[in-house]
Image (spheres, helix red, strand yellow):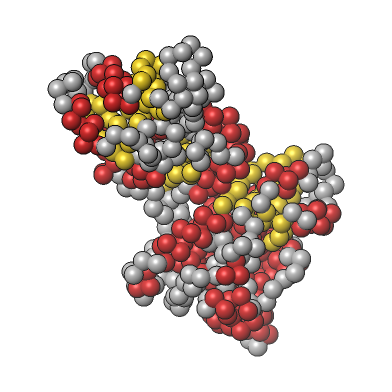
Amino acid sequence: MSDSDLARFRAAVAGGLAHLESRREEVNDLNVFPVADGDTGDNMALTLRAVLAELDRLQEIHGEAPIDAIGRAEIVESVARAALLGARGNSGVILSQLIRGAAEELVSRPGELVDATLIGAAIANASDKAYSSVREPAEGTILTVAREMARMIASDVAHAPGSPRLESHTSADLQDKVIADTLERGVMAGQEAVKRGPEMLAALREAGVVDAGGYGLTIIFAGVVAALRGEDPPELEHHAPARISHPQHTSGTYRYCTNFAVTGVDLRPAAFIAPLEQIGDSVLVVGDSSTLKVHVHTDEPERAAAVFDGVGEVSRFDVADMRLQVAERDERLAGPEHRDEHQLPLPSFAPDGNGAAPAEGGAATPGAGSAGAAMAGADAGSGSGSVRMRCGALAVTAGAGIAGLLEELGAHVIDGGPTLNPSTYELLAGIHEVQAEEVVVLPGSRNVVMAAERAAELSDKHVLVVPALSQQASLAAAVALMPDRDVKENAEAMRAAIDGVRIGAVAPAARDDAQGRFQRGQAVGFLEGQVVAWGEPHATLLAVMQQLAQEAELISVLLGDGAPLSADQIEAMADGSFEAELELREGGQPAYWWLLSAE
């Protein structure tokens, strides 16, 4: 491309990304092949974001130096590697290979301006590269769409021999027009290939959808056309989402979509495919002798990483829980308004180039924190939703009521089970699901901290673990979450929120007390982790509330599963016993009858 710097190239990529972002959820809702992992649009967008970030880095280093002065080879290699390392999921990895194939063709002709002939050759090489990266390529997918786009452009060039070749003196506007016209014809061919996909692939036909990756590719190129022309993108048909029921993708589907990079020396992608296929499916291993990108669907992400023990360094680990993705997608599609949203007009686009368990000692042992502020502010929360934020939160929970409160405050939650003990990979999958590039993890228990810290190290996102060592602390911290702040600022605000509350709890004793204070099944009351009361539930709860109420304005109580006193009984008991305001909410937590906090 004849340009004094990378600005026009970046603007084209940003245009493709912007248009994809405008229809990202529509692409997500289509996905059924090879399994219904539900985030094709997300994965393709992340790949393009990685390319943009690399272009920004190159611009910062080289400023306005001409492309040929920087070196096309350096630019292509940098962009291709960024796409590879930023790729996630089948669709993202295949898109990274399309980018590499196109880039290799463009760099092979130094000094030539990008015109229709070179565009056709680049997309053809991209298609070949993508096909070769998949062990068993399936027709009707993104692979077919890329091939048909290349064929259309090659046919146009062959049947229009009179088209002038672009010379060094060709204006940028004319070059942009030639490229845009060429790509638009490719997009139209791609759209026809997308629509024919169900004829070629039974999984698409049975689900009543087109291929999500192929559709996403046409959207990206339509966005590039818009950026080159400075106007709205060419119109593409909207496609209805996949049917909610997919029996073929239930019991036999592996749970985790696992992605990571491997760096080393003399790496051979083909050598690792068979070992990975022994523990999963949908295997992709692509890259070169020094850097590989690995994608596999498996129930054992740690075994996938272990395949590369002693071979190279594993990094950029990313794990997505596909069962959770499918459940969330099906819940969204079950809404009566969903079908209508695909009939809305195409969004206007103006490219700008920027695009806790019972303790061993006999009773539950809480950590630190409070739920009071969370209860007061829950109704004002925005919910986790699907809008990608700068910073989000992941909270480990036990109890439907607590989970609901945290979600109302904007946190993404995962069920830690009755003992609040999720695995590192369950936490990593949860981090992946947070619709933000930076994440604060709220462990909710001391038991979770080490696993959370390990997940934070493995994640490709910027993740910090905040010491919320109880469910009450997680709620207090979640109130301080501001999606537009960065992760460090949110972590500091959350720590301050936790420091501002005191916590208590009442639980049935798991066994007889060695000191003879209480017997198994009797109520045990805690204040800041210390046993302060025991005996009957009524008296024990009142004693804990009275101690918490000293110098407090609000006492919050989360009612646990199977608690022996009702909310009305607790209100009557507390009336006149202390001056602080009392707030009761259903927590649904196991093990603890009541979780309390004081502000």
Residue 377 makes an appearance in the image: yes
Disc count in the image? 0
Q: Left of 286 or right of it: where is 460?
A: left
Residue at the spot x=35%, y=48% of the render?
383
Q: Nearer the viewer, residue 375 or 120?
A: 375
**Left or right side of 494 for 379:** left
Residue 223, above or below 357? below
In this view, the residue farthest toward the top is 515
**Residue 239, percent from left and from top:** 46, 75
Position of residue 595 measured from the top left corner of the image (x, y, whole percent): 36, 30
Q: Nearer the viewer, residue 8 or 463?
A: 463
Residue at figure coordinates x 43%, y 14% from the top left: 517
- Residue located 60% across and 48% down the image: 319
In depth, the one of 484 and 280 nearer the eye is: 280
Whether residue 58 sits left or right of residue 358 in the image: it is right
Q: In the rendered view, would you say 321 is above or below 495? A: below
